[in-house]
Amino acid sequence: MIADSHCHAWRRWPYDARVPDPDHRGSVDALLYELDANGVDRAAVVCARIGADVGPDFANDDNNDYVATAVRRHPDRLTLVADVDGSWRPEHHRPGAAGRLRDAAGRYGLTAFTHYVRDENDGWFRTDDGREFFATAADLGLVASLSLSPAWFADLRTVAAANPTLPLLLHHQGMVRLDAPRFDAELADLLGLAELPNVYVKVSGFHYVSSPPWDVPYTEARTRLLRPIATAFGAGRLAWGSDFPAARPHVTYAQSLAVVRDHTPWWSAGERALVLGGTLDRLLGGSRP
């Protein structure tokens, strides 16, 4: 079983108004085609209500509803990971976040949600609102799929310790970039989070952490970043993700899968099976350490 822990689907392509196929390029149908073509059984569709900066016709304020509709049509293939208070939203880090999370969980029957923050740490995780937000997620039995930079790692450690039953699934290898001036320190901080058993990492987004972003099969990133992450966290806390269709300018869906399936000799077949789907299936199925 192969499961994609990180992909997207949008009604309208949210990145570039010039594309000739804005209604298909990032659509659910395009995603399902890639799943079928590459033998991927399931996908967690991470919502992102973006595109307003491209133009009013490209905004995806309805992205949660768009994906929820697709999940109802394909419950055996897709899981909704709803966008709650993402950094592009006017309600981002405003009072009432816990209530909005509870409302979204009830409306969509969530097992997981995503929360995007800005690169610079605004301290919100340490506020009363932030603490209530994550405590509510734990109370609801959700998985928190988090997009954050290394600037947030110290505060994330506090969140994880305060909510030991809440799985925290970090996007794109924690966004530790190979060309970052503090790469060694940021990697050490990420690896230190492995001490907390409820912190998980998505093996995804190699194009975000590599330079150039199309450096397939990402030999340097696999050696300097993924291999230490694999050692620290273990396969049971790692989950492969394609980042389709956002990754399209840099890597194909097939290549994103091959990077992990065909270029990770340090894993046994059983360990690789966990990364390629077993870990995600266990998380979304509710069986957690």
Image (spheres, rainbow, N blue to C red):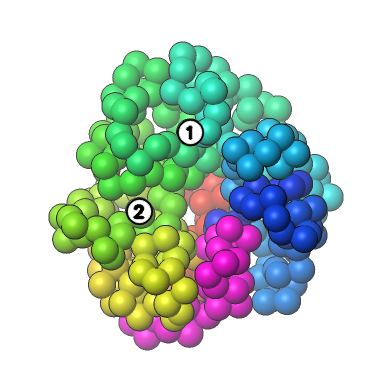
Residue linked to disc 2: 174
Q: Amino acid at mark 2?
A: Gly
Kindly identify the residue that appears in the image at 64 percent across and 36 percent down: 52
How far across and down, in percent of the image, does residue 118 sit? Answer: 40, 37
Instruction: Give the image quarter of residue 18.
Output: bottom right
Taking depth in this image into account, of 138 and 258 the one nearest to the observer is 258
Q: Amino acid at mark 1?
A: Ser
Is-magenta flag for residue 254?
yes
- For label 1, the SS is loop
Q: Nearer the viewer, mark 2 or mark 1?
A: 1
* Residue 62 appears in the figure: yes
Q: Is residue 24 left or right of residue 189?
A: right
Instruction: Give the image quarter of residue 19.
Output: bottom right
Kindly identify the residue that appears in the image at 36 percent across and 62 percent down: 209
Kindly identify the residue that appears in the image at 84 percent across and 50 percent down: 73
Kindly identify the residue that appears in the image at 42 percent across and 29 percent down: 134
* Residue 289 appears in the figure: no
Q: Is residue 222 above or below residue 165?
A: below
Q: Which image quarter holds the N terminus?
A: bottom right
Residue linked to disc 1: 87
How far across and down, in percent of the image, does residue 35 sit? Answer: 70, 68
**Highlighted magenta segment, given as a residue range:** 241-267
